[in-house]
Amino acid sequence: GQRIDAQVERAWAEQRKDRDTRWQAHQQKKQETRQKLKDESVSVQQKVEDRASVSGRFLDMAGSRLAAVEDTWLRESDREAAVSSSSLRSGDLQTILRAASGGSVGCHGSTIDEKP
């Protein structure tokens, strides 16, 4: 009787040990899977933030370059449109208009070089 009880007890102990080992392996695998998913999620979030940062830097750079082009265009158009006061004082109207328009168009659609 005691011998059978001892064998049963050993069998139960081995089963508990095997069950505990499987349970620990299961918990370890579950933890590793959770960590892997967390790491992948963080990686994806980091990539999204990196792309957003790159896009933001690109927009800033494009905006500054566009602003520089606009500023240059404004300066050039202001320079071309400006008539100096000394030109007005010293020259006649036809000479000033010829210089401003490149000598192409005068009053009433005629060229400046034509005499009315």
Image (cartoon, rainbow, N blue to C red):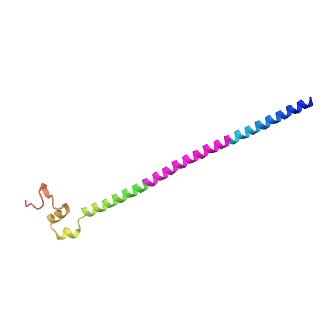
As drawn, the residue found furthest toward the right would be 1
**Residue 100 on the magenta span:** no
Quadrant of the rendered image containing residue 61: bottom left
Q: Nearer the viewer, residue 29 or 72?
A: 29
In-image side of 50 versus 8 (left or right):
left
Q: Nearer the viewer, residue 112 or 23?
A: 23
As drawn, the residue found furthest toward the left would be 116
Q: Relative to 79, is 50 above or below?
A: above
Q: Nearer the viewer, residue 28 or 11?
A: 11
In-image side of 99 versus 61 (left or right):
left
Q: Relative to 7, is 46 above or below?
A: below
In-image side of 38 versus 99 (left or right):
right
Q: Residue at x 47, y 53 (%)?
A: 54
**Which secondary structure is most common in the magenta stretch?**
helix
**Residue 46 on the magenta span:** yes
Q: Residue at x 25, y 62 (%)?
A: 80
Q: Residue at x 64, y 42 (%)?
A: 34
Q: Residue at x 12, y 58 (%)?
A: 111
Viewport quadrant of the C terminus: bottom left
Q: Relative to 50, is 115 above or below?
A: below
Residue 92 at x, y = what percent? 15, 67
Specify the segment rendered in magenta.
29-58
